[in-house]
Amino acid sequence: MKKNTELKTAHIPNQDESVSSTQEFEKKTEKPTPISFEQPVVDSAKIIAIKYKQSLNYPPYSQPLSLNDFSLLNPNYFEPITMVTQDSNVTISMALEKYHFVAPEPIKVRVSGAEIYAAKIKVQDTDTRKTISNSTMQYSEGGYVAEIKGDSDYPIDLQITVLANVNGDDIPLVAQVKYNQKKCHSDRCQRALCRW
């Protein structure tokens, strides 16, 4: 057996070769250009960072309220139900005075929008779908209104459905409300509404 006695030598580039290869590498890999953000984006990022820092000052269960927390500051506000019809692109909406009612308060409903020719209203128990009342809404001051008489036998969860006749089509508007039976007369309870 013959042993391989050849010496393998590594190629060591001379100074000129290494300089040229470094220059070629720099040409191939261009430095990334810094991203420039427009000023509104920078301002928005600053606001987000400030808000995040402020939120860390308080525990999650005890965050301070601001004027932007409308739904938390007004828990009984009813957001109007709005719908755009497909055929005529007419916008119609249904509005209630509030979200929580206490017996025997009446529930006032208003439907407004262009090209409404008639409107019917139906009140149901949300859980059982049992119909509590049906009536036709009356036209008044550019819209249709109805007042549902309050009753101490109403269930807590009510569904109010309005069928608005827009250009011959019945468009449904559906809302859910709470109907509590009585105010709390307990000295221990300071809430305006409760189920005692």
Image: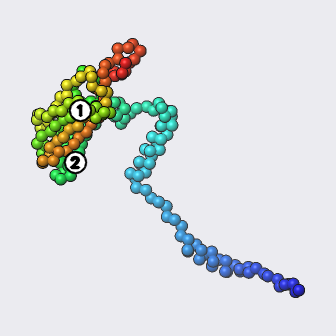
Tell me where residue 26 appears, x and y as whole percent: 58, 72
Mark 2 or mark 1: whose residue is earlier in sequence: 2
* Dot 1 amino acid type: Thr
If the image is split into quadrants, where does the C terminus sit?
Answer: top left
Residue 114: in sight, yes or no? no
Q: List the residue tagged with mark 2.
A: 84
What element does badge 2 sit on? strand
Residue furthest toward the top? 187
Q: Is residue 168 left or right of residue 78?
A: left
Give the quarter of the image for residue 75.
top left
Name the residue nearer the viewer: 157 or 96. 157
Could you tell me which residue is drawn at 76 percent across and 79 percent down?
10
How many numbered tags mark residues here?
2
Location of residue 98 with respect to 45 vertically, above or below: above
Q: List the residue tagged with mark 1.
A: 131
What element does badge 1 sit on? strand
Give the quarter of the image for residue 183.
top left
